[in-house]
Image: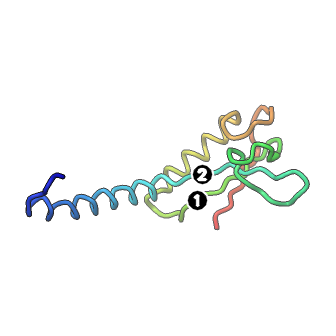
Amino acid sequence: MMLLSSCQRMHAPFTQVGFSLAFVVHESANPHIAVLGRLPGTTIYRNVQQYPEAYTYHGIVLVRVDAPIYFANTSYIKDRLCEYESNPDQSIRVGQKSNKFILGNLF
């Protein structure tokens, strides 16, 4: 068993708090954005990565931002939505040429 000196024991909580704060800032500035699809036979929409059977519509991408939108993450969200608009292959699996609409669930 390794014993820590009093100086090392004093710095350990500050290091842990620093890593925790860095993680929170990173996660809030780069939120998860889920592409949604409708489950067959229902009116329920779920993440297409978690529910591969979820149906997506031609020309429409439904997205859900899993964090509050504020000044630190608006550019990240805007860039991701532009990617979905310009590259439909990353956002949905149904064969189509371009997306006409991007709808967001921002609650």
Q: How far apart are marks 1 and 2 (CA)?
A: 6 Å
Image position of 17 (left or right of 76)? left
**Which x, y percent locates residue 55?**
82, 46
Q: Is residue 88 above or below residue 43?
A: above
Which residue appears farthest toward the bottom when viewing the image?
107
> Is 103 or 49 nearer to us in this picture?
49
Q: Do the residues labelled 1 and 2 touch (CB within 8 Å)?
A: yes
Q: In the rendered structure, which amino acid carries the disc numbered 1?
A: Asp
Measured along the vertical axis of the image, is residue 73 above or below residue 79? below
Query: Image height check: is 91 above or below 105?
Result: above
Q: Which type of secondary structure does the marked residue at label 2 adopt?
A: strand
Rate crowding at label 1 as few (under 14), some (14 to 19) or many (20 or more) other CA atoms within 10 Å: some
Query: In the rendered view, does 47 fall on the left or right side of 27?
Result: right
| Pointer 1 residue | 66
Tag 2 residue: 33
Image height of 87 relative to 12, above or below? above
Identified at 64% across, 63% down, the residue is: 106
Residue in view at x 74 percent, y 47 percent: 51
**Mark 1 element type:** loop
Residue farthest along the front direction in this orientation: 1
Would you say 41 lies left or right of 60 here? Answer: right
